[in-house]
Amino acid sequence: MSHALEIAHLLDDAARHAKAVPQIDPHGERSLDDAYAIQSASIQRRLARGERRVGVKMGFTSRAKMVQMGIDDVIWGRLSSGMQVEEGAPLKFARFVHPRVEPELAFVLKKPLAGDATLVEALAAVEAVAPALEIIDSRYQDFKFSLPDVIADNASSSGFVIGAWSDPQQDFGNLGLTMSIDGRVVQVGSTAAILGHPLRSLVAAARLSAAAGEPLQAGWVVMAGGATPAEWIKPGQYISIEMERLGTAGFHVDTREKEAK
């Protein structure tokens, strides 16, 4: 087994068993291509267990985050059916290592989208848009990681919750939103924080996924990226997003803590 496959197995097992592992690249020396190859191999293990590929998530979609991480492009991860949490359903806290949540806009596509798609072509491929919440989790000990670490770990994507779908032929480029925990607003933002307009994130998703040989398909979900900083998730919480004109989405976190090791 190659070293990359060994790491993919390590990270997949870490996610599956919610058990933290040491960093694989503490000094950030691994190429991003290698990190994405590890991510792909890790997701293939999920598909081999019977999960289905259902879309793409985008990360580092704020300019400030790109500058902070020293990169000039967004990152992306793969969504599988096992990651989707039904809106309003309980989230098992014990499934995660360091879970956080961020508010997002989600797209669902009605037709495939080519890697060189324009903004107009991207919008024409959208079936609907919805308010959404992404559960992000790092599987690394002490919550320490380099950029290649993050990418290899599926860009930290661990779960997603999507609200009711709406007609995309409305302006969703600057919709106000709030994220609340137990009814208390903890983040306020706008969809404009996602690369200036969420459609730009969809175009980037088309470009990056096509370059990896996995072009966006009809029926796939694209999570456009966090519109505000993330918040930590704790047992017993109710976490929700309210987005201007598009409505709400939310989930309960169950009260069962992880068992002591």
Image (tube, rainbow, N blue to C red):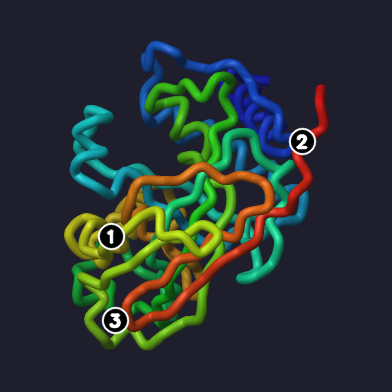
Callout 2–callout 3 Cβ contact below 8 Å:
no
> Mark 3 is on which residue type?
Ala
* Residue of label 2: 258
Q: How far, Cα to Cα, is label 1 from label 2?
A: 32 Å
- Left or right, residue 16 beside residue 228: right
Q: Is the C-beta separation of discs 1 and 3 under 8 Å? A: no
Q: The residue under label 2 is which amino acid type?
A: Lys
2 vs 3, front mark: 2
Q: Which residue is painted at 59% across and 30% down in the image?
A: 139
Q: Secondary structure at mark 2?
A: loop
Q: Secondary structure at mark 1?
A: strand
Q: Position of residue 25 (x, y in %)?
A: 46, 16
Q: Residues within 10 Å of mark 1 (few under 14, many from 20)?
A: some
Q: Earlier in the sequence, mark 1 or mark 2?
A: 1
Above-or-below relation of 222 to 151: below
Q: Report the residue marked by disc 3.
A: 124
Q: Which residue is mark 1?
A: 189
Q: In this rendering, which labeled residue sits more in front, label 1 or label 3?
A: 1
> Picture coordinates of residue 20 (x, y %)?
65, 25
Of the numbered discs 1 and 3, the one sitting upstream in the chain is 3
